[in-house]
Image: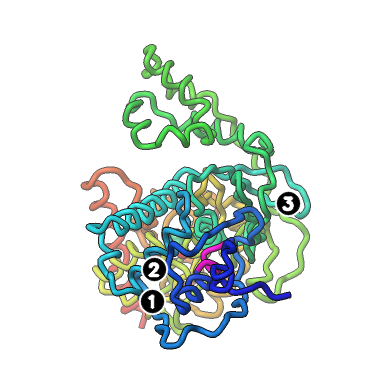
Amino acid sequence: MRPASAAAAAAAGRPVLVHSFDEWRLAARDLLAHQVAPHLVQWISHKDDGDLFSQPAEPEAAPAAKQGSPTVRISRKLMDMLQTAACCRVPNRWSFLYLVLWRWQQGEKEVMSAADQDGAKLHAMVKAVHREEHDMHAYIRFRERREEAGAPRFVAWFEPSHDVLPQVARHFAARMGRITWMIATPEASVMWDGATLHSTGPLMRGPEDIDDAGEALWLTYYRSIFNPARLNADLMHGHIPSRFWKNLPEGSVVPEMVSQAAAGARKVGQTRSVGERGGTVIPIAASKAQPQRDVPSTLDGCRRCELWKDATQAVPGVGPVAARLMLVGEQPGDQEDLAGQPFVGPAGQLLDRALAQAQVERREVYLTNAVKHFKWELRGKRRMHKTPAQREIEACSYWLDSELAHVKPQVVVALGSTALKAVTGNPHAALKDVMGKPFLHQGRWIVVIYHPSYVLRVPGADLKAQAFNAMVEGLREAKRLVAQAI
Ligand code: URA
């Protein structure tokens, strides 16, 4: 049996049941169309059984609207505010939102203004929700779990004060590629299977249910970056509201480190943490480390090393096949991995500036990377770049060699050390030996310049400007060599 409409329920003195904003919106439209005043409606809600990502519910059978009842047209801006405010956990939120909508529909447009009493409450709710979204983005920490078929690889626990899980989950889905993860909260959980978001209900009792694999690693990392000489405990607590500390993995080691620092350990703290870091992994001869593999027919199907597993997609080179100049970077970064295009993130923007200064047209050069999949590790909530290993550079040389053979550039610019090793095929090639000294290799000029990420990272304005100018000079030199070779 189809449920009665909201207006019919209100007329019969029954409460209007809503689980989500979409259901409230449909009910509110129906009530407005029947000119049902706010004080005649009782709203109730069960938060637990709704699907976080559900489509709007089917409209319920509505009785005929009252003769002469107004057409319901609601401003986009108001709708956006109501939708955001609906995530705010205040008592009677649905009836308050309907009151606002009712007043607006009655011509009281001031209800959207912060100077109005209801408007002020609406603005405060919107602000609280935005702040909670921001805090959840900032303070969520993913932890890696033990491998388990069908289970998400990364898990985070968070206790939001408002219902912001769906939008936060969408935020991470758009940023973390195809690795699988779950965000659990006391009210609901969301899982990303690499392609789709699923809401799963409250699976866990709390953070203690989260598998601790990776936690120890995180703490080691946090200790290693902790610099007691720069400690300002007040500032630290000021920046991270205290309610988040208990769920931050580093929260458990901070008090110990703070007290050590206060007790005079500042001078030695960092040295000790550096000394305690694990030893280097002993490299295996690259050829032995590589699995047996067939020659893949397309880059996207490449399984020549393991990097494809954690990347969203392979990032191929771009540019004209007739380009005389080829630029080779290291590997796609976070943004390139998501976009499928090389050099579109911050390093790409700096490269664009250097190209413009050297009067080299980006659209005339072929841009590629030594390694075609993004290699990264998760630190908290960020996919951080990890330098590719020699075996990965060698595995990917198959693709770089095909690009070189296809494009046949006269000049190749290697951006940084990984690119230098890749274009020369020499794992021992060192930047310092060849920087500013173009050389011939297999019949083409190789020009070596700094990698743009190095220029971004280098501390101090003077050093940064020097490194940037050296990049520009290298690009100018490459342009001259191209002109000579014609
Ligand atoms: N760094 C690189 O080396 N390549 C890119 O595509 C982006 C950043």
The answer to whether mark 2 and mark 1 are in CB contact below 8 A is yes
Q: Quick one: SS at disc 2?
A: helix
Q: Callout 3 environment at 10 Å: few (<14), some (14 to 19), or many (20+)?
A: some
- The amino acid marked with disc number 2 is Leu
Per the image, the residue denoted by label 3 is 151
Q: Is residue 78 left or right of residue 248?
A: left
Does 21 appear in magenta?
yes
Q: CA distance from mark 3 to mark 1?
A: 43 Å
Per the image, the residue denoted by label 1 is 74
Q: Main secondary structure of the magenta part?
A: helix
* Residue placed most toward the observer, 422 or 101: 101
Q: Which mark is residue 246?
A: none
Residue 37, quarter of picture: bottom left
Range shown magenta:
20-24
Quadrant where ligand 1 appears: bottom left
Sequence-wise, which precedes: disc 3 or disc 1?
1
The percent coordinates of residue 243 (x first, y second) are 46, 34
